[in-house]
Amino acid sequence: MTHSDERLVYQITVTAPGTKSQGWHGVLLDIHGKPMTVEPGKTVHTHFGTFVSVAESTPWTPYGMIHEDTVQWMQTHGGNVIMDSEPWAYRLYVEREGSKSEGWRGELLHGRGIVPEPSDEKPFATPMGPFTWVRPVHLWDRAGWLHVSVVEGKKAA
């Protein structure tokens, strides 16, 4: 469910889910909703953090724009778990962009629907690694589904 005062900023799509060629592709969108083209190895800084452009090397590895905390997490934990053949995606929205109350909301999609808020505090396993549900305290918080690496990175900051 999108809100009227939010904009899609980032999206991950799992490619060829459930196959040996499964991978995933991260796309950072500009202010006009167009995918950014960023040279591999270069970074883009946002209010959500820094995203790194990762070159596509094989069909079964993550590539595209990936949050720097997730890139570091992938180096020790992997980052492409084959689970099932249903579509998987992740979307990150900015809410009230440019205001003092700017906030961020993450959304996981699996199959044909949005993964709902969990009833427990356990991370949710996805092909992109585990995501955790974060409840907002303030309007300007990060909320919804967030990759555990981003949540852990924010705590360390």
Image (spheres, rainbow, N blue to C red):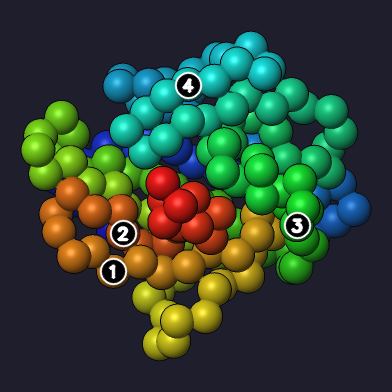
Residues tagged 3 and 4 counted as in contact (Cβ below 8 A): no
Residue 27 position, x and y percent, is 53, 32
* Residue 111, numbered circle: none
Residues tagged 3 and 1 counted as in contact (Cβ below 8 A): no
Horizontal side of 52 relative to 81 (left or right) equals left
Quick one: label 2 or label 3, which is nearer the N terminus? 3
Whole-Å distance between the Cαs marked 2 and 3? 23 Å
Residue 51 position, x and y percent, is 52, 30
Whole-Å distance between the Cαs marked 3 and 4? 24 Å
Identify the residue under disc 4.
44
Identify the residue under disc 1.
135
Q: Residue at x 15, y 59 (%)?
A: 138
In this picture, is 96 found above or below 57? below
Residue 148 in view (yes/no): yes
Q: Is mark 4 on a helix, strand or loop?
A: strand
Which amino acid type is shown beneath numbered disc 4? Val
Between tags 2 and 3, which lies in front? 3
Which amino acid type is shown beneath numbered disc 3? His
Identify the residue under disc 2.
143
Quarter assignment of residue 149: bottom right
Q: Which residue is drawn at 47% across and 30% down?
A: 50
Quick one: label 1 or label 4, which is nearer the N terminus? 4
* Residue 77, numbered circle: 3
Crowding at mark 1 (Cα within 10 Å: few <14, some 14-19, many 20+): few
Taking the view exactly as shown, the residue that stands out farthest to the right is 20
